[in-house]
Amino acid sequence: MPTRRTVDAFTRTLHALMALSFLGAYLTSDSEFFKPVHVSLGYTLGGLLAARVLWGLLGPRHARWSALWGKLRGMADWFQGLRTGQASWRQAQNLYMASSVWVILLAIAPVVLSGYVTDQEWTGDWMGEVHEFLGNFMLFAVLAHIFGVLLISVLRKRNLATPMLTGLVPGTGPDLIQSNHGFLAILLLVAVFSFVFWG
């Protein structure tokens, strides 16, 4: 079956590392024994957010902030259509996915910063409780995102997770991605694993 490349390797690697960093940090959040791992993964997540910000400014068109923001521009029109009974549910699916991505990205900085303040013990226990609340909120946002991927995949009879795993979608036509940015993906992996294991 012919395929087309729609997501580059660097974007996919960044997505996977952010997901794994958050998962690992969340799973080790209640363990004093694994606290160094929790802190290291939290800082890693913060660094990956910085990389995502730069990638959104300098990366390919599909990864730009303008592209992600553009997916939300139709929200006002959709609500207007909802009031008149002419709302597009396919557009609602796209708006839901774009919104869930924005919520996750916006949640990372408060989670990491509150974790840093807690780790430095600059405040009392209340900052730790704020950090825990923000971590749980981000978990909820991540689960909502995963739920959206699964539900929309069923509704459209197409696996929406595949492009973020392989970079490819079935179909004929030109690749939407001119460069796979494989070298940048390797550099990102080396940097992250170096920080986590030897930092």
Image: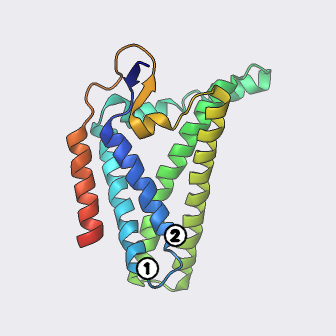
**Is any atom of residue 188 visible in this view?**
yes
Q: Residue at x 54, y 65 (%)?
A: 135
* Relative to 156, residue 186 above or below: below
Where residue 24 is drawn, which disc sits there? none
Q: Residue at x 57, y 38 (%)?
A: 97
Total numbered labels placed on residues in the image: 2
Quadrant position of residue 169: top left
- Mark 1, residue position: 34
Q: CA distance from mark 1 to mark 2?
A: 9 Å
Q: Residue at x 26, y 51 (%)?
A: 188
* Relative to 54, residue 48 above or below: below
Identify which residue, 163 or 127, lies in the foreground. Answer: 163
Determine whether the residue tagged by mark 2 lies in a helix, strand or loop.
Answer: helix
Q: Residue at x 54, y 85 (%)?
A: 125
Coordinates of residue 164 in the picture (x, y in percent): 44, 39
* Relative to 80, residue 152 above or below: below
With 115 as the anchor, is 84 left or right in this view?
right
With 188 as the anchor, is 7 left or right in this view?
right
Quarter occupied by the C terminus = bottom left
Where residue 27 is drawn, which disc sits there? 2
Identify which residue, 133 or 157, lies in the foreground. Answer: 157
Coordinates of residue 171 in the picture (x, y in percent): 45, 17
**Is any atom of residue 199 visible in this view?**
no
Amino acid at circle 2 = Leu
Coordinates of residue 167 in the picture (x, y in percent): 39, 33
